[in-house]
Image (spheres, rainbow, N blue to C red):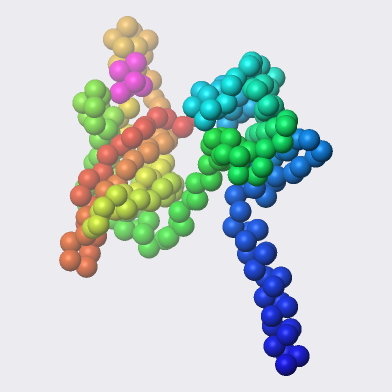
């Protein structure tokens, strides 16, 4: 019987904690002070951007606007004061209601502020996957940047030694049986054609300025698209998204 009472007592404490944990930030941060109520939320916007964005959203929510000072991060509406301030890498947006509003009502306004964007998680640098990418690019031998450069932006692959650096930047699954990878490579400059640089060099030669030899390697950003064929994944397309000599 004592054990049962202990279990029930523990459950009584756990249930409210679980409810609190599920509350949105605006509800968790809600406070009442005399005749006013206050809460705050965080956003990835700058203080000025937050104040510039809110008026139209608040008006649509039925709030009567009075004035704003985006440069100071301040907004004034009927019964509502908003203050946006830098807080670390985010912006803290405080909503103060006088006379006080209950938690759901004040959170209705605070929820109009876009939350911070979670930082992108860098994919694991799987050596086996990178080895597959390199092998597939060697078999393809050359990739280009589509568009107005008409293939003048290009990169060739002749041997494993051409890959001075190779990083997986992002990975996506746009559809079933499809995979996309954004990669960044450093290649010898003589393996690459870079339209903006090569055309400029040619112009200097024609003007009698002499041959320009570029020795710094090139940074090549590319997207690799794979299609599942039975149990294997096959490189179906590889395109350059950006190419330039390293500084």
Q: Quadrant of the N terminus?
A: bottom right
Vertically, is 167 above or below 219?
A: below
Q: Nearer the viewer, residue 119 or 12?
A: 12
Q: Residue 20's quadrant in the figure?
A: bottom right
Q: Position of residue 86 (x, y in %)?
A: 69, 32
Instruction: Tell whether position 81 is magenta.
Output: no
Q: Residue at x 39, y 25 (%)?
A: 213
Q: Main secondary structure of the magenta part?
A: helix
Q: Is residue 247 left or right of residue 228?
A: right
Horizontal side of residue 132 vs 110, given as left or right = left
Query: Does residue 48 appear in the picture of this structure?
Result: no
Q: Position of residue 222 (x, y in %)?
A: 34, 41
Residue at 32%, 53% in the rendered image:
173
Residue that sits furthest to the right in the current view: 34
One can see residue 106 in this view: yes
Q: Position of residue 234 (x, y in %)?
A: 22, 57
Q: Residue at x 68, y 26 (%)?
A: 79
Residue segment shown in magenta: 195-200
């Amino acid at each position: 019987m004592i054990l049962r009472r202990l279990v029930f007592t523990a459950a009584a404490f756990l249930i409210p904690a679980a409810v609190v944990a599920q509350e949105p930030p605006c509800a968790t941060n809600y406070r009442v002070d005399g005749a006013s109520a206050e809460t705050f939320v965080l956003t990835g916007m700058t203080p000025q951007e937050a104040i510039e964005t809110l008026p139209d959203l608040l008006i649509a929510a039925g709030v009567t606007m009075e004035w704003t000072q985006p440069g100071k991060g301040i907004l004034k509406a009927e019964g509502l004061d908003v203050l946006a301030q830098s807080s670390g890498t985010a912006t803290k947006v405080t909503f103060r209601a006088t006379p006080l509003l209950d938690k759901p009502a004040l959170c209705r306004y605070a929820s109009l502020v876009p939350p911070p964007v979670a930082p992108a998680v860098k994919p694991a640098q799987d050596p086996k996957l990178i080895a597959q990418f390199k092998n597939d690019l060697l078999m393809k031998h050359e990739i280009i940047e589509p568009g107005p450069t008409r293939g003048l932006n290009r990169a060739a692959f002749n041997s494993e030694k051409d890959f001075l650096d190779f990083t997986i930047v992002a990975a996506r699954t746009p559809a079933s049986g499809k995979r996309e990878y954004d990669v960044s490579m450093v290649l010898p400059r003589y393996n690459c054609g870079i339209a903006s640089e090569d055309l400029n060099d040619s112009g200097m030669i024609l003007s009698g300025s002499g041959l320009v030899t570029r020795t710094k390697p090139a940074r090549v950003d590319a997207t690799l698209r794979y299609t599942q064929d039975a149990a294997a994944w096959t490189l179906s397309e590889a395109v350059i998204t950006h190419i330039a000599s390293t500084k």
